[in-house]
Image (cartoon, rainbow, N blue to C red):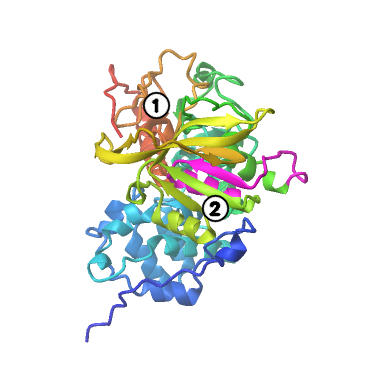
Amino acid sequence: MARQIKKKRVPVPEQDPKERIHNFNEVALGYTWELATEEASRCIQCPVNFAPCIKGCPVNVNIPGFIKKILEKDVKGALEIIHKTNALPGITGRVCPQEEQCEMNCVMGKLGDRINIGKLERFVADEARKMGIHPEVTMAPKNGKKVAIVGSGPAGLTAAADLVKMGYDVTVFEALHDLGGVLIYGIPEFRLPKDIVRYEVEYLKSIGVKFEKNVVIGKTYTLYELLEDYDAVFLGTGAGTPKFLNLPGVNLKGIYSANEFLTRINLMKAYKFPEYDTPIKKGKRLAVIGAGNVAMDAARSALRVGYEEVYILYRRTREYMTAREEEIAHAEEEGVKFMFLVSPVGFVGDADGNVRVVRLIMNELGEPDESGRRKPVPIPGTEFGLEVDAVVFAIGQKPNKVLYQEVPELKVTRWGTLVVDEKYRTTMRGVFAGGDAVRGESTVVLAMGDGKKAAKAIDEYIKTGEWPEEIKPQSF
């Protein structure tokens, strides 16, 4: 007799919205064993060589395999299956847009709700951590070759993990005083607790990856100097330069980039000022310009540092927002207000140079633009003002030029991203790159996928010495 498949996914317990807006504790509380087993039992165990969920995962985790191990109560087995292709499951289980990747392809979607793959992956990582379980790793003998990784974000950490297992001497250089890149400075504690990131970094240290903090490549050392000491270099420097709109009043005090706003809160603990030295502007009303995940992070963080009213200002309608549905829903539950079809046209300040009003104009949607979304068209005569105490720009970021502005061999695109080919080779021999440095602002798991593929290409290059005469740019 065929077993009855439960069509509805098992919900994940969460903090109550009224409570969580007053703390930075994680919102999603995670599955218990009972809930995880119930959700895992919904998986119909597609064969590995067919499973669409695996094909949808940028790092090709054997999803049916680790879910089966949950049903067998085998945490170590589940962890080792995940670790074969993903060295950071505690992170990806929390911040991957699974609904657009593995879960989108889940066969269960034809019968009911798709399997909650992300929360099951997080469950495995969290249970292993609680139980002190680490995966058994197969390490190749040391080969005497050295690889430098620039940046300790998801691309750099993944490349480092794979290369050290291949026998390379790997050193990761990080510009900041803490490790994790965007995982530490960009994603709030309530979405990704920093002790999870540090735990994953400690695992990499335990298998031999070395780290050097407070090192700015391009200033502390040049890229040329790295190439003198290392056989290859991987650039996983991310996209840390914020974008602003060139509008009247944009330089008023109280106008932040999301990068600065979130770095002050996440990395420098501004919400604990004066216990920590970094302040952040407090007030009654804050407006966030943008509608991606970073905008949601900024808006929800603003509530937690004490703003009474927080607005998301977006030039299109809700259906075109790029943030994950889960993040939008959480923001709505917490009281963030959304203003659609509005664009800023300027800012007005007080006598002391503090922003006091954001000037807005109403839009209507026109024909689709190059992104496939309908283009916002301003409606003449519809300007109005919104009183604010602070504004956060969350309209995207681009790579920082510090690393390569004095390295003419490294070619960049018109968007400021590094030119690479299909093997993540840059236009400078021995230098590879991946993640947001080549994609622009993207997702954690896509950066990890780049790190994996680049590690394989680095291994091939060091073994063969082959490098193309011309790099044929890869588009992402």
* Residue 278: in magenta span: yes
Q: Amino acid at mark 2?
A: Leu
Locate residue 64, reporting x and y percent. 33, 64
- The residue depicted at 61 percent of the width and 64 percent of the height is 19
Q: In the figure, residue 211 lies in which quadrant?
A: top right
Callout 2 crowding tier (Cα within 10 Å): few <14, some 14–19, many ≥20 = many
The local secondary structure at tag 1 comes to: loop
Q: CA distance from mark 1 to mark 2?
A: 27 Å
Q: Identify which residue, 423 or 448, lies in the foreground.
A: 448
Q: Secondary structure at mark 2?
A: loop
Q: Which mark is residue 417?
A: 1
**Rendered-image quadrant of the C terminus:** top left
Q: Is residue 15 above or below residue 139?
A: below
Q: Residue furthest front?
A: 381
Q: Amino acid at mark 1?
A: Thr
In the rendered picture of this protein, how many numbered marks are placed on residues? 2
What residue span does the magenta drawing correspond to? Answer: 273-302
Residue 152 appears in the figure:
no
Task: Note whether 286 is above or below 324 in the view shown.
Answer: above
Mark number, residue 462: none
Residue 366 lies left or right of residue 288; in this view the side is left
Q: Which residue is mark 2?
A: 192
Check the image and name the residue furthest to the bottom. Answer: 1
Q: Position of residue 232 (x, y in %)?
A: 45, 26
The residue drawn where x is 74% and y is 43% is: 276
Q: Do we see residue 63 in this rendering?
A: yes
Residue 160: image x %, image y %? 48, 39
Crowd band around label 1 with a 10 angstrom C-alpha radius: few (<14), some (14–19), many (20+) = many
Image position of 268 (left or right of 201): right
Q: Residue at x 41, y 72 (%)?
A: 10
